[in-house]
Amino acid sequence: MKSRTTLLIAIALSGSTAAIAQTDSFASAMDAAMTRMHGAMMTGYSSDPDRDFARMMIPHHQGAIDMAEVELRYGKDERLRRLAQGIIVEQRQEIAVMQSILSEGGALPPHTEPTATGHPHQGDRP
């Protein structure tokens, strides 16, 4: 009986150790993702707010992708796993848009705002 109790305690402790190791791995992965993101976002400022925004948002979105991938690796809640998958898809699409804009070089197109009819007019600014 004593050896069975010892075996059950050993199994319980090994499960706890595995859970702690998984939590440590999760925390380490999340910390690494956030450290990369914050470092990459600190690009400095230029005279172009639009370009600065895109240059800073790309690593911000990449950080969201990295953190979502950590959720997929360690998370168990199916709702959060589906959310993480959506984050990965959407953030990659937004990164592609910002990279495309940055690669165009030169001036960004003029700002457009909808009029009362809902149709945008180039350069209409208050």
Image: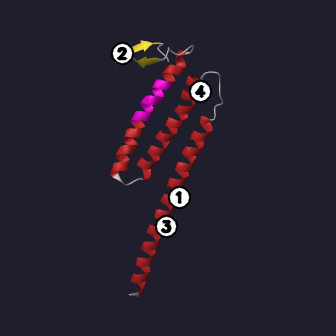
Label 3 residue SS: helix
* Dot 1 or dot 2, earlier in sequence: 1
Label 1 residue SS: helix
Going by the numbered disc 4, the residue's amino acid type is Asp
Tag 1–tag 3 contact (CB < 8 Å): no
Residue 68, horizontal then vertical, whole percent: 44, 44
Quadrant housing the N terminus? bottom left
Mark 3 highlights which residue?
Answer: 17
**Distance CA(mark 1)–CA(mark 4):** 35 Å
Query: What residue appears at the point 59 percent right and 24 percent down from the top-left corner?
Result: 49
Residue 47 painted magenta: no
Q: Left of 13 or right of it: where is 49?
A: right
Residue 7, horizontal then vertical, whole percent: 42, 78
Going by the numbered disc 3, the residue's amino acid type is Thr
Going by the numbered disc 2, the residue's amino acid type is His
**Distance CA(mark 2)–CA(mark 3):** 61 Å
Mark 2 highlights which residue?
Answer: 119
In depth, the one of 9 and 118 nearer the eye is: 118
Residue 105, horizontal then vertical, whole percent: 56, 15
Label 4 residue SS: helix
Mark 4 highlights which residue?
Answer: 52
- Taking 124 as reference, is 18 above or below it? below
Mark 1 highlights which residue?
Answer: 24
- Taking 18 as reference, is 53 above or below it? above
**Distance CA(mark 4)–CA(mark 3):** 45 Å
